[in-house]
Image (cartoon, rainbow, N blue to C red):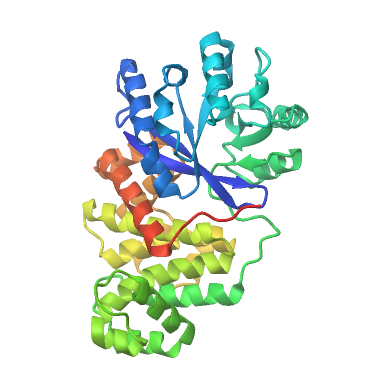
Amino acid sequence: MLATMLPIRDRRDRVVGYTVSSCAPSATAPAASSEAEARATVDSVPRFARLAGRSVVVPVMPSLVRDGTITRFASTDAVWLVATSALDEAGTRRAVERLTGQGFHFALDGFPEGEPLPPTLAGATLQLDAWHTPPAQLEGRIGRLIEAGLRPMVRGVDDRATRQRALAAGAALHSGRTLVRGASAVVNRDAEARVLRTLATLAAFSDGRPPDAAFDAFIEDDADIGAALVKAMSSAALGVRGPRSVKHALNMLGRDAVMEQLVTVIARMIGEAAGDPELAFLALRRARVCERAGAALEPVPHPRARSAAGLLSVLEFAFGTPAYDVAGRLELSPTLRDTLERRARPLGMLLDAVDAIDYGWWDDFRARCALLGISPLMLSDAHLEAWRDARDELGHARLDVS
């Protein structure tokens, strides 16, 4: 099973949960296997919830609601997404009403066109699809749902105009592509400059050249970078007592180990510059998945190039700056420059595949894996493993949301 989780954002652009998205590894899988795949997805819900650290919205087939499959997960922080039209079937309707009374949470997928909704679903989240709904109809439906006491969530918000339209109409939640943040978001330009300087240092050694005295001078001369590195190394599971200073770290652990921690530090700084901790998580997750899956490319880029590519791919969203402009502000190798501009080389093509899995574009994902000659299952597994690693490294936990 291929699987990912799609961020759900509130009206202030904060991530408040994730929607599980999954599909078969092959587009030619027989239709008869759809229920087995649905059961496999449901069986994986506890794992998704642990990785998310927040509520997960799980699409579920009506048959799995009726037969009580989901009751095994009563203690899991999950919201079960059922097709609104499925409530026209009496058995599904009764099962949803019964389970709601037992404390299970349901959301609905699709504008209600049939029978009136059960009173037990008053205030429930209802998902609308921006991909398949004309803009004027989308706005009208959002308004009607709010009047009915429901909570509209719009999926497929893949451009800023759609996001603005959904928010102006009153949508409580939205999901889709990672976008440049709203006009109210303020980027810390001092922190942005520090990110670029630090990334330039990492990129300078992306060909595998051993770090030298120039690297020592950079991290020792910037007190903020030095303090962040010491903090990262003190909290990392290094199996030794944490270093007291950057110089101590260099002597105790060596330059390569210190540079490895620089990846986590840069990810944190990206989130701080953008004022969005989710972007720190996204940056580190992309760095780690590129490190893993990039080992299958031919020729194999150095691990530093792979992690730098993942970090670079987030900058346009964090800083509100086009990727080609970011490329113009940094001295990069041809391979890394390609990841920001054409994505014609294998590492850039890998980032296209990472984009596809991040957004649940499964047909595109499988096609891009085929172009690269890598297994979709391998990249899907690497993606979830990178999610776990980034969560652990950043201490990514539930945020208090008002």
- Give the quadrant of the N terminus: top left
Looking at the picture, how far across and down is residue 385, in whole percent? 31, 51
Q: Name the residue furthest top.
A: 90
Q: Quadrant of residue 230?
A: bottom left
For the question of whether residue 117 can be seen, the reply is: yes
Front residue (pair 401, 157): 401
Could you tell me which residue is drawn at 66 percent across and 19 percent down? Answer: 117
Q: Name the residue furthest front.
A: 102
Q: With respect to residue 263, does 182 lie above or below? A: above
Looking at the picture, how far across and down is residue 20, in whole percent? 45, 37
Q: Is residue 259 left or right of residue 167?
A: left
For the question of whether residue 345 can be seen, the reply is: no
Looking at the picture, how far across and down is residue 133, in whole percent? 64, 27
Looking at the picture, how far across and down is residue 377, in whole percent? 27, 39
Q: With respect to residue 315, does 330 lie above or below? A: below
Could you tell me which residue is drawn at 25 percent across and 77 percent down? Answer: 240
